[in-house]
Amino acid sequence: MRVLLAGGGTAGHTSPLLATADALRRLDPSTEVTCLGTPRGLENRVVPEAGYPLELIPPVPMPRRPNADLLKVPARLRGAVKETLAIFDRIRPDVVVGYGGYVSMPAYLAARRRKLPLVIHEQNTLPGLANKVGARVASRVAVSFPDTPLPRAEYIGLPIRRMISTLDRTALRTEAREFFGLDPDRPTLLVTGGSQGARRLNQSVSGAARVLGAAGVQVLHVVGPKGEATPEETGVPYKVLHFVDRMDLAYAAADLVVCRSGASSLTEAAATGLPAVFVPLPIGNGEQTLNARTVVDVGGALLVADEALSTEWVEQTVPGLANDTERLSAMSVAASSLIPRDADEKLARIISAAAR
């Protein structure tokens, strides 16, 4: 079986794509997986590192407001579809799988033109434009959240990496804290803005370093490739890193995480039972707030708007929560009971069936 996986840009698309690729190989080691992306996305690094071939087409961004760029979309889309068809004719996939985003629309149109089976996976509660269009012609439509408004949607959850889905945070806690140079016994806060970083998260939490340290809370702060944080020295560990390859150990080291609520960040935190403070990214169509609600409403997380997240809010809320072991335990149980951990295998079986 030859499978083409189309998705890229941020970790929100590339992480489930790679989790699916691995699951397809486990299901049938002879499966040939090719990934389709654009030259400017995260896939240019993570896909080759994962050992999968990557084909590139030009991105076709859709302006959020009417402007001069909107007039260029039809020509750009035709060009991208033409390049996608050439890739299809060269690798001859049996099935096409799309995760939404800039790269997926050309793949969906090319799949329809070549009459290939198409499987779509939507990461967010509120679907994007590409998946709204693709779902009309797809053979199967899989979604991460049960109330996603797409036709014929099958709720399976979000494919996540096996290193995360099989993680036992308690068993790895001592090893994880040693790995990052943290105190083995202090309450530990993880801060991460995802693959794009998060300036407000970085500034608000690092500005609260003195109060966090006074409460005995140590911090593992992933600021992003271009992010910065300059916390005050308190004698309590506050580790600032630009990137972490071992997110399994970061989750295992933490008692609480402050993060965005993109589908991947939310699903990984909830699936591992890590209590969270979700700060939805204040751009897009509001999907991150809707994503967060699924966990917040069952008691597994707190929700704070981006504009409301300040150093004062962190100082007033986070130290007490990080030291409240009973509440954290209840949040952990609520979150972990909500999220399926086997979505990668479910999606692999759907893809295999569609190809047949």
Image (cartoon, rainbow, N blue to C red):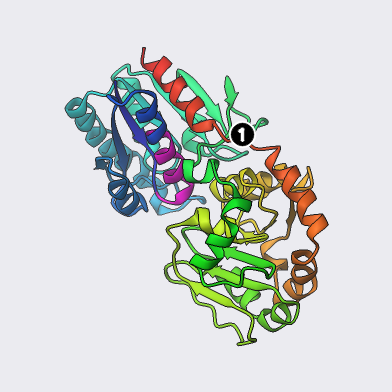
Secondary-structure class at tag 1: loop
Could you say which quadrant of the image residue 230 lies in?
bottom right
In which image quadrant can residue 308 be found? bottom right
Rendered residue at 39%/52% (across/down): 69
- Label 1 Cα crowd, 10 Å radius (few <14 / some 14-19 / many 20+): some
Q: Is residue 127 above or below residue 225?
A: above
Question: Could one spot residue 14 in this view of the protein?
Answer: yes
- The x, y position of residue 66, in whole percent, is 49, 50
Question: Which residue is tagged 1?
Answer: 340
In depth, the one of 206 and 149 nearer the eye is: 206
Magenta highlight on residue 10:
yes
Residue 241 screen position, x and y as percent? 47, 71
- Check residue 54 for magenta coloring: no
Towards the viewer: 37 or 336 = 336
Q: Position of residue 64 (x, y in %)?
A: 51, 50
* Residue 151 appears in the picture as rendered: no
The stretch in magenta equals: 9-21
* Residue at 58 percent of width and 56 percent of height: 252
Q: What residue appears at the point 27 percent right and 24 percent down from the top-left corner?
A: 30
**Quarter of the image that includes the C terminus:** top left
Quarter of the figure with the N terminus: top left
- In the rendered structure, the answer to whether residue 37 lies left or right of residue 222 reads left
User: Could you tell me residue 343's position as x and y percent?
Assistant: 53, 31
* Image-based side of 316 in relation to 255, left or right: right
- Viewer-closest of 207 and 334: 334
Q: Amino acid at mark 1?
A: Pro
Q: Describe residue 111's horizontal placement relative to residue 180 as left or right.
A: left
Q: Extreme top residue here? A: 356
